Amino acid sequence: MAFKRKEATIEATDLNAITPEDAEKRIIAGVRKYATNEANWSQADANTPFLGHIIGMGIESSNLADITMSIERQFLTKKTKRVPLSEGSSEFKLEDGELGKLRILEGQDATAATPGLSIKMLVDLGHMPKNEAYLSKVVSFAYVTSVGEGYRTNDALKKLVARIEKLAGPEKDEAKANLKALCDQAKAYEALIGDAAAFTASRQKISQNDKAAYDSLRQELSVIEDKIKGVSATNDAERLASLRAEEAEVRTRLRMSAQKLAVSSAVAREAAERTPVIQAKIEEIRAIVRQSLQEAERALA
Amino acid sequence: MTLDVWDVASLRLQRWLSLLATYPLYAFIRVVFRWRFGYRFSNAREFQEKIWKELDAHDGPLFWAANHLTLIDSFLVFAAVVPWRKLHRTRLIPWSTPEYRNYYHLGSWPKKISVRALMYLCRCIPFLREGEDEASERWRKNVFAKCEWLLKRGESVFMYPEASRARSGWLERHRPKDFLGRLALEVPDAKFLCVYVRGESQLYTTAMPRRGETFRSYGRLIPAVLPGETAPRAVAQRLFDELAELQEEWFAASPLPKNCGGNDVLDLKSPALAEHFDAASGEMDPEWAARHLTGREMKSLEAVAPGFARFAEACKFIAAKEAAHKALAQSGIQTPSGAFRMLEADLFRKRIVHLPTGARFDIRFTHEDEDKIHCVAVLRGGFIGDDETPGDVLWEVAEVPAGQDAHDFARGKCLEFIAKSSDEIPSPALLAFADEGGIPKVLLRGKVQDWGVSLSHSGRYAAWSFMIS
């Protein structure tokens, strides 16, 4: 295809020849043009979310794939040899080969929500050597999303308090009912994220739902396999072909369902692990929410 | 079409044999449901009391008409409606018309024979849905004739008015199917037993409900044909309206959100988006396209002339998927961010399928010009609307004033829009935004509203939508 990227040529670097900190800097620099919140982008670190406008870099969701593509363009890896997952399969995994262009396969970037998590993804996929000291500073995906939720709740709370101050009469009373509901929500959030066991249980529930969805799809596949078995005994070639197409479709869906389950299972697993960095982030957002709650209580009085 | 003597004799034999098997089969179904799958029926007693008061007063033919979400719905509906003490009302035990190709060639010979025997004893008359040839047509006519013959003798027939499982998990009243209306007009003294049964965690169509599921049921008995009704569509529409009402009752008592809609706007002149399109060659970045589009979508895109048209078409896919992603999140189905290829859009049919679950959305492009594309998507809760019928989704698209935060602008405008769309909300000050797991929710008088609110912004534009169903 004639397409040529209009940006300046980037000199790609071998991921094994740079430190995670350097890679992190390059990742942040690489997404600059997609970041709509320049202030947050310029202060970004390993744990700054790519998405979101409050603490994130403000990258729009339509540019999500650009983050991955930007990472791919900047780095080289030895994991370049394509090995089919099974004989005749178009799906493949990457194993050690010649140094070449980094390639992140479908679904592999599902939890790379921050520069630090992007580094973790590269480490997990074997593109970079493991650096425990760096990874210990990275907030897990489970907590990046949950802390982000806290900031959004806090933002909603503060904005409503500010609006209420400008209102008067019955409008103010009605708006106070909303503020009370938001306070309840913020309190529930603060209590949940403060309780490691309850938080883990809530994430496990999501994972169980995904597991149920995966199992249900397996059932669907087994029904189709049964139909194929039954029709194979007849001479209905047209019906057999249609069932085979249906089977292929459900297998694709099953693969995607497995990807989705892998993400929620990882979140459920990570939810149980609170490193000092994560704990600090949790305490930080809890303190922020508590302070906003106090302001809200004053506005309600 | 009239039945021949063999058809009649075979129906009589099947009826007689199924009568012998009624109690053991019922016990079998109950035991399997309870002990193998852990199914429970939460409001069974009150539902059965109510429905049997009406059924006991009806001595004529009966159509069972229910919503359709899983492959075992016929058994679930039967178990929900019929208690042990009513099994003697044998004329109310329905005849069913399962699709022949789905159920009569399942697995190895022993399995096939067992399934066929079970279906026979459960009063099933195999139906052939596909096929335009004469034999298939004759088959269908014969099944309809059998149903008519049974109904005219005061028997009951079970049919799904939607004809197949609702892929969105939502019975859509604006898309009635006429076949049941046609049949009802042949038996005007019949009644419709409208039943809505759904598992509390049944988000979308599945092969089977999940283990340990709890079902809640609603139902009503209504006349099949009202005086003056002569058109199958009128009968079918009334039936769909009734089932839709039952669906509303079900969702009113459910923690599941009913309205699941989303919207997305794309600024086609946004530099970050336009960089994937080479204006000179008219080509799109294949790497970028491959990360957003499925093989089927790529194929359909190749049919569009290279240049802006192809770029705009690709952006329509992205906008549709983003809108669907938001609707999906509202329904409780989490999809990883950026997983564009988990959604597959068919722009011609205006549909999107979430591949991991098979959940199906309706989409509608409300703005398509050189500057922007705006799309709304609905999974459930209401009608998306078409050229003839206004939908249940309201939306607005506007340019973000210079210097204003697009996010705050969209939120403020959305509340204004909701307030001006309702007679009961005099001012947007009565509304506020909350966030539930990343999903925007609107509060009114301290209560979270099930409005399927969705916000979007891209480049110069912001958009917002909500559902009024």
Image (cartoon, rainbow, N blue to C red):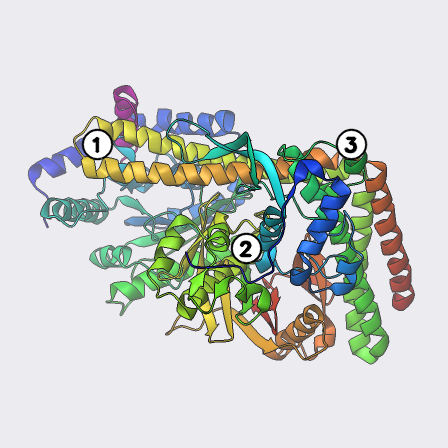
Q: Chain of mark 2?
A: B
Question: Number of labelled discs?
Answer: 3
Q: Is residue A94 magenta?
A: no
Amino acid at the residue labelled 2: His
Q: Chain of mark 1?
A: B
The spot of residue B90 in percent (x, y) is 31, 37
Q: Which residue is disc 2 drawn over?
A: B325
Q: Nearer the viewer, mark 2 or mark 3?
A: 3
Closer-to-camera residue (B425/A37)? A37
Q: What is the chief secondary structure element of the magenta stretch?
A: helix
Give the vertical position of B371 relative to B239 (above or below): below
Q: Chain of mark 3?
A: A
Give the vertical position of B273 relative to B105 (above or below): below
The spot of residue B323 in percent (x, y) is 53, 60
Q: Which residue is disc 3 drawn over?
A: A132
Q: Is residue B125 visible?
A: no
The spot of residue B376 in percent (x, y) is 50, 65
Which residues are drawn in magenta? B106-123
Residues at marks 3 and 1 touching, judged by CB atoms closer than 8 Å: no
Give the mark nearer the N terminus: 2 vs 1.
1
User: Mark 2 and mark 3, same subunit?
Assistant: no
Q: Which mark is residue B14?
A: 1
Q: Is residue A276 visible?
A: yes
Amino acid at the residue labelled 3: Glu
Q: Is residue B115 magenta?
A: yes
Q: Nearer the viewer, mark 2 or mark 1?
A: 2
Closer-to-camera residue (A156/A94)? A94
Amino acid at the residue labelled 1: Gln
- Considering the numbered disc 3 on the image, is that residue within a helix, a strand or a loop? helix
